[in-house]
Image (cartoon, rainbow, N blue to C red):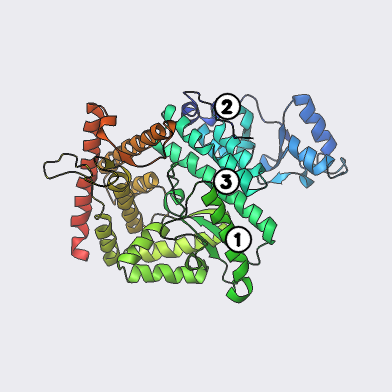
Amino acid sequence: MPAQPLPRDADNHVTLITTPVQALIRRPPVTLPPHTTIQAAAQVMCEHRVSSVVIVQDGVLFGLITDRDLRNRVIAAGLDTSRPIMEIATLAPMTIDLQSPAFDALLMMARHNIHHVPVMDQGTVVGMITTTDLTEQQSNSAVYLAGAIYKQTTVEALVETSGRIKQLQRNLAAAEASAYSTGHIVSAITDALTSRLLQLGELRLGPPPVDYAWVAAGSQGRNEQTAKSDQDNCMVLDDAYDETVHGEYFRELSRFVCDGLNACGYVYCPGEMMAMTDQWRQPLRRWRQYFHGWIEQPDPKALMLTCVFFDQRFVYGKRELLDTLRDDVLSRAKGQRIFLAHMVGNALTHQPPLNWLGNISLIKGGEHDGTVDLKHTGIVPIIDLARVYALAGGSAAVNTKDRLENAAASGEITEQRVRDLLDALEYLSTLRLQHQARRMSDGHAADNYLRLEELSNFERGHLKEAFGVVKALQSVLGHRYQTGR
């Protein structure tokens, strides 16, 4: 059966982005102590007409049980209902702060396929929000799409379900959701697809022989994906990995996942920077050697690889493997002025399309004649600047907006310049998303090439100003590091 289109409510995600979690809480949480029996808990849930209760003792949150737990872990398993609820509970559940935007709850539910999240205020449980609460805000499509992904049992079914992603992006564009929010939502869905493929791969091949971390890089790693994305991923394997013993398992698993992502529309990376490539499926000790070499000998290829693989984010497996690697890389890169100078030089190869008079220059000749490449001549230069600031300041942030804000806090760049760059990034990214949405609505493939005729004179003026901001900041950074090369 073909995937059904997602809702087209004009305010589909705006409400969720601007609404605090606190506004979704309708009642105090229903709490029970750990020694409560399963039967007694079920009676309480029935009396209060709730789908979940939290387990609390002496003000401390211990766990959570839901009606799904009663069905799957008790009734289906034939468990004695006189047993304590701690035996069926989700211990140490994920929580969200009372003052957080409801959008953060959507991301949490979408990424982790959960439907109940306790709300905390200074360490105390003050409420519970569910997917139903988000439904009533008419902003649940990402949560339900992620849920649908986790229910699929074949690659073919995942391919069919993934067809809804383009509609999701069109909905977000229609709702005028920010580029920052859109990138997080679309990336969360890609994370869900990747995680489900890994689960299916493990079911097919058996449990992994050693621990691993599946890592997103590039735009997915930065939480900045759009419908026009290829794959950038890798695997960090435990140092217990032995190629002769374990190699075949991880070759098959990574190929299964990358092939599945390609079938779902995330095409193979043209540069083969994917986990199914032997070079990018290595134990932790080898990854450390990679980064050490790139930092100490920053030739053009090393700089290109650093740009891709420094933008890493954990997706599935054992998180500590990536955390260990990133801590090592950040401490090694910070203060390496010669390396940073080469990174700046590499960043300056992507220049905004402004001529010597300060006017916008269009692409001449070829398939994209008469257009502006919003990605490579507008957004990528800002990404590159933010990456340099993160490396110079030892910031662990991966998202471009987060990196720039951290850079302002550390003194790497003034707050005024950060505001200018963030405004330019949001404007360029929004133009790109709206352009892609128009193309997809017209039945064309999404791309990054904008014709100025699509814009009003007012919008063209802002586009020119955004390019000017980027060019000015590139010049500042170039002067700062030119003596280090």
Q: CA distance from mark 1 to mark 2?
A: 41 Å
Q: Are marks 1 and 2 in contact (CB under 8 Å)?
A: no
Give the residue at mark 3.
Answer: 192
Q: Amino acid at mark 2?
A: Leu
Residue at left 32%, top 36%? 427
Q: Quadrant of residue 60?
A: top right
Q: Earlier in the sequence, mark 1 or mark 3?
A: 3
Could you say which disc has been placed on residue 141 in the image? none
Give the residue at mark 2.
Answer: 24
In percent of width and height, residue 439 lies at: 39, 34
Secondary structure beneath dot 2 equals helix
The image quadrant where one finds the N terminus is top right
Q: Nearer the viewer, mark 1 or mark 2?
A: 1
In percent of width and height, residue 463 lies at: 25, 36
Q: Amino acid at mark 1?
A: Leu
Residue at the extreme front: 366
Q: CA distance from mark 2 to mark 3?
A: 25 Å
Residue at the extreme left: 357
Left or right, 91 with respect to 71, comes to: left
Could you say which disc has been placed on residue 253 in the image? 1
Q: Nearer the viewer, mark 2 or mark 3?
A: 3
Residue at left 36%, top 68%? 294
Q: Nearer the viewer, residue 281 or 448?
A: 448
Q: Is residue 232 at least partly visible in the picture?
A: yes
Q: Quadrant of residue 75?
A: top right
Q: Residues within 10 Å of mark 3 (few under 14, many from 20)?
A: many
* Above or below, 78 relative to 350: above
